[in-house]
Image: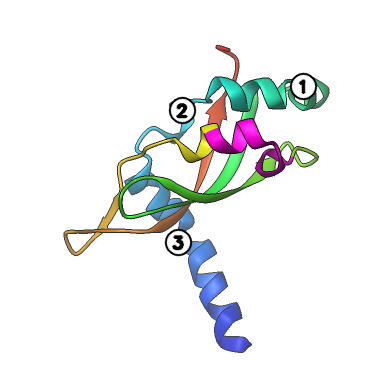
Amino acid sequence: MLVMRNLALSLLLAIPIVAQQAVPDANKLVGPKAMCDAAAIKLREAGTDKVVLIMVVGSNGGVESFETEYPKSLKLEKVKEAATAIKKIKLQPATKDGHAVSVMVRATFDCSQQ
């Protein structure tokens, strides 16, 4: 149990560094239309146009899984159309020792252009 906590903590601490490698312009990502449409009401309530996701990006650059971090009351993982659109996102894979690796990243998507 302690090993898992330490592993989880080390993964969380590594997110900002890894995210910069895997998602070079994380602040400039435009959210997929299906995601922004599904989030529209919660975004208006929160007074923002940003959706923040924690994603596992595979070594092929595809989104393997994700969880909605912000807005707090939004659960895009439970909205089929949004989840499908998010899992179609392709990013540049992170690398370690010259090889593509799976990573967990925190990415902010802009829905203001939808």
Q: Which residue is mark 1?
A: 47
Mark 3–mark 2 distance (CA, rounded to whole Å): 21 Å
Q: Which residues are magenta?
A: 75-84
User: What residue is drawn where x is 66% and y is 44%?
Assistant: 77
User: What residue is drawn where x is 45% and y is 26%?
Assistant: 28
Q: Position of residue 89 (x, y in %)?
A: 43, 35
- For the residue pair 26 and 93, the one nearer the viewer reads as 93
Q: Position of residue 111 (x, y in %)?
A: 59, 20
* Sequence-earlier tag: 1 or 3: 3
In the rendered image, residue 39 lying in the magenta stretch gets the answer no
Give the residue type at disc 2. Leu
Q: Which residue is mark 2?
A: 29
Q: Which residue is mark 3?
A: 14
User: What residue is drawn where x is 56% and y is 71%?
Assistant: 9
Q: Callout 1 environment at 10 Å: few (<14), some (14 to 19), or many (20+)?
A: few
- For the residue pair 16 and 30, the one nearer the viewer reads as 30
- The secondary structure type at the circle numbered 3 is helix
Farthest left residue? 98
> Left or right: 65 with respect to 17?
right
